[in-house]
């Protein structure tokens, strides 16, 4: 991706043993504006491989001076969250992609129902700021583990009052999805950010209760899962060995074959690439079954068990 | 020989040497000319040289001709995000006339107020940076000071507080920016025309299209739906990122240099299509080119759809022989559905015959 933003790390805060917060400011000029729900990709240098993770911007979109993100240390990190936690210090300069938004609050919603699991709280911090500004009706259901992923809980309690519904997993408090979804005014839109299991539980429950798909929004920015090594063959005949812990997109970038991308998580559709041979393990949430016959999303999808995938690149 | 000539015809833009870098000053902008009644609008030689002739080939068919809006050569219409030219005063005077007669040409639905401020911010920032002799912007927090030296405006206001401006923010800033602007809300995997100001449309109406989805407002366009043009265009537009605008050119023909060819005023201009004769083609018929420019509005996530219109009379256009030759071939071979859709039926044969004198192969 071209036109990256150079930012300086203005401050780092350890919010819990698992979550670090980073505030970025522009090295020169102004940071581009962003809307609630936007994310940036953080490019991580010096990791010996192309590494770049997407993080939601959690600061107030009206705030023009800085961007803020929070990063949860992943137990099975491929290197990204560990790099952010162990290497990045105040004063460092990092490069970001410009903000992109694949998870905007719906402009016509009568009521905004936010459901966050753990670090999935981050986009909703910007939502809440934007909705306060607009006078939008909202409530937040926040499932966390106290002392580990209960990020921003005090601030949220102060801002939202009775509109905050906290669920501490360590204290055995459970989010009753069915109850929450059953008891909503007409015109409510629900937004989910958190682990895949939370997203699928809410989506299935909402569907069973007759919610129209247009009123259910979710964001899962999981990093690509590792898999088997395989081989990618380019249109010019070059072949790339893709290691098990590399995505195809990363292998292409390392080989100097950049592919446009926004989310690196199989959602946005930007990196859609035609292929003509090879058995593909499709892991995206974007392509239709018919498109999968000859297109793949290299940010998450891979060749099956050592096969060679022939790309039209 | 003649077929060699055809192959050697140049692409869409005139040779770059013809476009001169320019520094716009107050003196670069003409006194007010008219787009109605006595039609005193004319292009200078410099304006003709930078006219966006839209045909890269000798024939024309729809395509998804959207491209990244990269910065173009100095002096060209692609140099800045928002092009200001010698017609600025005239176009703003025309907009004021249209709005005085029909306030419904500007519309901002309640959920689009943030996008209206976004548009104001984007236009003010770019105009002040790109044309420092004409505009300036000073900001301290939400206290903003805007100066427009062409229209002699000096405005202190509070960003985000519409009561500190003389009118609604989208209308305020687009009364000072050439071209029409639609502001599209992005939701439900679609784009909706929920705000805009449209005083110089090529036969479409904001009041009619208000609230429509992307495919709904394109429904009248022939052929392109079957070609899948709109499916691909919509996907592309929804992925536009902050700071990475895209653009395309569109075209039609207009009788007289009339900016406001809207359905609302059809009774004033529709009959002029019957006035074209072999003797008046050069003065009466104008090529109308739209530079459509689409940036993401950063704080609202809405998409701005700018439609900057350029008009050139056939007499002015044929001063560039290669344009005249190519326009002859394009219009001669235009599919019948497009002749009908663009409203050319009544005078199509007359102009093709007239243009044939500029085509060595005709």
Image (tube, coloured by chain):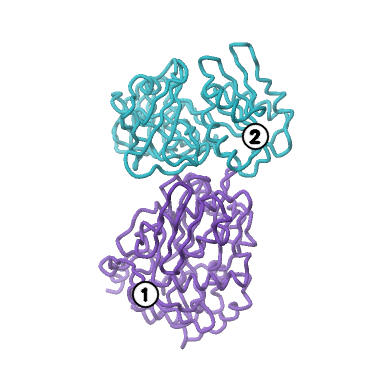
Q: Residue at left 47%, top 79%? A: B351
Does A146 sit above or below residue B223? Answer: above
* B60 vs A260, nearest the viewer: A260
Residue that extends furthest to the left in the rendered view of this protein: B17
Secondary element under disc 2, as helix, strand or loop, is: strand
* B108 vs A281, nearest the viewer: B108
**Image quadrant in which the C terminus of chain B is located:** bottom left
Rendering coords of residue B208 (x, y %): 65, 62
Graded by Cα atoms within 10 Å as few (under 14), some (14 to 19) or many (20 or more), the crowding at tag 2 reads many
Mark 1 — on which chain does it sit? B
**Image quadrant in which the N terminus of chain B is located:** bottom left
Does B9 sit above or below residue B139? Answer: below
Rendering coords of residue A127 (x, y %): 56, 36
* Pointer 1 residue: B325
Q: Residue at left 43%, top 19%? A: A73
Residue B202 appears left or right of A165? left
Label 1 close to label 2 by CB (< 8 Å) = no
The chain displayed cyan equals: A
Graded by Cα atoms within 10 Å as few (under 14), some (14 to 19) or many (20 or more), the crowding at tag 1 reads many
* Pointer 2 residue: A138
The chain displayed purple equals: B
């Amino acid at each position: 991706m071209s036109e990256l933003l150079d930012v300086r790390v203005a401050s780092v805060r350890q919010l819990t043993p698992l979550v670090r917060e980073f505030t970025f400011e522009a090295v020169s000029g102004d940071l581009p504006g962003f809307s609630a729900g936007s994310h940036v990709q953080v490019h991580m240098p010096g990791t010996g491989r192309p590494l770049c993770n997407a993080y939601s911007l959690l600061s107030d979109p009206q705030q023009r001076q800085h961007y803020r993100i929070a990063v949860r240390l992943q137990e099975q990190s491929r290197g990204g969250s560990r790099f952010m936690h162990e290497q990045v210090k105040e004063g460092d300069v990092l490069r970001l992609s410009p903000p992109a938004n694949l998870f905007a609050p719906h402009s016509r919603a009568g009521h905004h129902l936010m459901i966050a699991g753990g670090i999935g709280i981050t986009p909703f911090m910007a939502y809440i700021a934007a909705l306060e500004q607009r006078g939008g009706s909202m409530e937040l259901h926040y499932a966390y583990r106290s002392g580990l992923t209960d990020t921003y809980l005090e601030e949220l309690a102060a801002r939202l009052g009775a509109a905050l519904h906290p669920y501490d997993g360590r204290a055995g408090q459970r989010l009753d999805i069915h109850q929450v979804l059953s008891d909503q005014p007409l015109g409510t839109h629900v937004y989910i950010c958190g682990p895949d299991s939370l997203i699928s539980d809410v989506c299935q429950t909402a569907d069973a209760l007759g919610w129209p798909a247009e009123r259910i929004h979710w964001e899962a920015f999981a990093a690509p899962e590792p898999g088997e090594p395989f081989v990618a063959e380019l249109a010019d005949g070059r072949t790339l060995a893709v290691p098990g812990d590399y995505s195809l997109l990363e292998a292409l970038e390392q080989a100097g074959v950049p592919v446009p991308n926004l989310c690196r998580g199989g959602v946005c559709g930007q990196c859609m690439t035609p292929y003509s041979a090879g058995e593909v393990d499709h892991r995206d949430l974007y392509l239709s079954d018919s498109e999968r016959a000859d297109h793949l999303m290299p940010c998450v999808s891979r060749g099956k068990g050592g096969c060679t995938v022939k790309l039209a690149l | 020989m003649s077929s060699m000539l055809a192959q050697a015809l140049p692409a869409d833009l005139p040779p770059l040497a013809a476009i001169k870098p320019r520094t716009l000053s107050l003196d670069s902008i003409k006194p007010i000319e008219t787009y109605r009644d006595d039609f005193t609008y004319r292009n200078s030689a410099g304006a003709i040289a930078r006219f966006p002739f839209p045909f890269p080939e000798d024939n024309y068919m729809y395509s998804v001709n959207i491209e990244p809006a990269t910065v173009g050569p100095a002096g060209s219409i692609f140099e800045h995000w928002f092009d200001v030219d010698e017609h600025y005063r005239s176009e703003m005077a025309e907009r004021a006339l249209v709005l005085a007669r029909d306030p419904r040409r500007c519309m901002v639905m309640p959920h689009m107020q943030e996008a209206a401020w976004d548009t104001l911010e984007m236009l003010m920032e770019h105009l002040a940076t790109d044309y420092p002799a004409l505009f300036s912007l000073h900001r301290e927090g939400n206290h903003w000071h805007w100066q427009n030296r062409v229209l002699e405006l000096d405005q202190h206001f509070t960003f985000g507080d519409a009561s500190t401006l003389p009118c609604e923010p989208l209308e305020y800033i687009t009364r000072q920016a050439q071209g029409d602007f639609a502001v599209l809300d992005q939701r439900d995997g679609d784009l909706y025309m929920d705000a805009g100001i449209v005083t110089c449309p090529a036969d479409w109406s904001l009041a009619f299209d208000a609230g429509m989805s992307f495919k709904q407002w394109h429904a009248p366009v022939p052929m392109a739906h079957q070609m899948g043009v709109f499916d691909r265009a919509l996907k592309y537009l929804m992925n536009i990122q902050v700071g990475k605008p895209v653009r395309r050119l569109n075209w039609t023909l207009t009788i007289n240099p009339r900016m406001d060819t809207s359905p609302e005023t059809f009774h004033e201009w529709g009959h002029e299509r019957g006035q074209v004769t072999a003797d008046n083609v050069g003065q009466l018929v104008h090529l109308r080119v739209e530079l459509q420019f689409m940036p993401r509005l950063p704080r609202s996530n809405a998409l701005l759809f700018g439609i900057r219109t350029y008009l050139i009379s056939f007499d002015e256009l044929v001063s560039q022989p290669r344009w005249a030759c190519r326009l002859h071939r394009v219009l001669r071979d235009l599919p019948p559905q497009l002749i009908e859709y663009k409203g050319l039926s009544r005078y199509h044969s007359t102009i093709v015959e007239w243009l044939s004198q500029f085509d060595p192969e005709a």
